[in-house]
Amino acid sequence: MDKVNVTINGIQVSVPKDYTVLMAAREAGIDIPTLCFLKDINEVAACRVCVVEADIKGVPMRNLPASCVLQVQEGMNIRTNTAKVRNAVRMNVELILANHNRECLTCLRNGTCELQKLCDELGIKDIEFVGAKREAKIDNLSHSIVRDTSKCILCGRCVSTCSNVQGIGVLDFTKRGFNTEVAPAFNYSMNDVNCVYCGQCIQACPVAALRERTYIDDVWEAIDDPDKYVVVQTAPGVRASLGEEFGYPVGSDVTGKMVAALRRLGFNKVFDTNFSADLTILEEGTELLSRVKNGGKLPMITSCSPGWIRYCEINYPDFLDNLSTCKSPQQMFGAIAKSYFAEKEGVDPKKMVVVSIMPCTSKKTEANRPEMEVDGIRDVDFSLTTRELGNMIKQARINFKGLADEQPDSILGEYTGAGVIFGATGGVMEAALRTVADILTGKDLDEIEYQVVRGIEGVKEASLVLPIDGKDTEIKIAIAHGTANAAKVLESVKSGEKEYHFIEVMACPGGCVHGGGQSHVSAKARLDVNPKINRANALYELDKSLPIRKSHKNPEIIKLYEEFLKEPNSHLSHKLLHTHYVKRDSYMVEQEEEFEKLLEKLNK
């Protein structure tokens, strides 16, 4: 690639000609502050915090350009630390603070807020400007996401993420001037629009304008109630992120300490969602084989991701019959805990409270779906995010780093490597292939790492030949993560361009490891580390370390079928572990109908 020579603060560097000044400065080891910048997602120069002085071959550039969008040129001389730059950056941040809700001590993002950190770095102690505060509108009607206008700094990171990464676009700038805010159209609540509650907007937000709806107090109340029997399950991705809440590097596996901390919080039993991930593979794999052998609806599409399910229900209802009828591992666990486990332990299921710790904000909404219950008993009572668990551990004053590793309880705590990798994009597919391949070949295959389905490429395709009904059959598969990529795959199937047998879809980019409920990684830190890769690698390493790596070999799963369910896809399995999905009208449909009615009145 062609390079150009530039000078930054007296340091000469040679960088690719398509670099921005911000990228070139990083190459030279020079830090330029940013706020609205989110690499490859939001590069719009809205906040003006990354401004620099620059001239080209001695000719000064007009004003102070924003380095995040300023492309390098041969002979460019850049200065990032002049009095003019420092004063401008400070003034721009103070202007943001002038109408910002600065109740930092009681803010959910206290300590992880990027604006707060920037103020600390710039040494801002007093604010010269006093302005009117933005009206605080709290939208907390959904089970998953809370929006607070008083915290919003109009950086646009959530808008770009929702539109450009997820392809949904429920958030945008509304109104004008000082009254500008980021919100859904027509002043709708997040509860009433096409939001899938993936929480990627929360991950993008540098402040606390978007946050998860918390159920911490409800869980504490249940734990403190002597009449309640409270059990907890933890999803695969949580163990690869929770450590970040306590200063561990991104992608550290803290499974043992997580289990120990949960016991100290007071849960009656500490279990693992990896167990029900293994269970999901038995049910889903059997369903896939049945469809392939008996001419069922293909391609079959995974149903583990509630954000993806909601996206499909709203945008692609024609594919609802393609979805696996399996509940997600979160919901399967709850159903088994309140039936099989409750029966064995002699616990009244009506007094049992099932809490899930998830890397996902959409799981909160999934737990509250009306169909997620059996005989009037909810599968899961409360779903908390990784961040909420971190907060609970801190509230309990537990020395997380000082904990000795512990193992989850049986009989719903044993898991295989296949259950672990559910948390990474491609993991569900790989886990399913490990079991399906063994069943079809009648062999205990040694080659179980399907590298072709791994990685963070948006859409991955593969095929493998498996013996079905006595003849070799090519099974075509696809993996998509992020709803925008899911749309690409579904459109290719609709048009007839592609033909698959099995498709895995995760709503979040990178899969659950980068879910909306995972620990916050600042935009600055993301330039050096990719949470999707680091956390996924932690799960793959854990998978390698386990003695059993195939779901159908989990002894607790085998025992569950022998003693209770009898076989995958049995009548009882369908009652407890399977569900259905419904078409959901888009709020835009409602608006179009209202507009048509208005036109009719005007025409009359």
Image: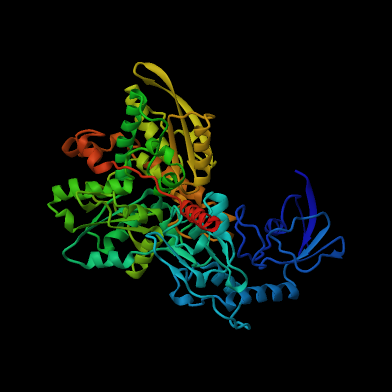
Q: Is residue 474 visible?
A: yes
Q: Image quadrant of residue 72?
A: bottom right
In the picture shown, does residue 453 fall above or below 308?
above
**Residue 591: horizontal and vertical position, in percent?**
49, 55
Q: Residue furthest top?
A: 470
- Residue drawn at the location 49% of the way across and 64% of the way down: 187
**Residue 217: horizontal and vertical position, in percent?**
31, 68
- Camera-side residue of 303 and 108: 303
Q: Residue furthest left?
A: 346
- Camera-side residue of 282 and 44: 44
**Residue 260: horizontal and vertical position, in percent?**
30, 58
In the picture shown, does residue 123 fall above or below 307?
below
State left or right for residue 355 relative to residue 248.
left
In the picture shown, does residue 556 fall above or below 330?
above
**Residue 341: horizontal and vertical position, in percent?**
19, 48
Q: Residue furthest right?
A: 58
In the picture shown, does residue 32 fall above or below 252?
below
- Camera-side residue of 265 and 213: 213
- Which colour assignment does the render follow? rainbow
- Residue drawn at the location 27% of the way across and 57% of the way down: 381
State left or right for residue 404 relative to residue 499.
left
- Residue drawn at the location 63% of the way across and 64% of the way down: 34
Q: Image quadrant of residue 324?
A: top left
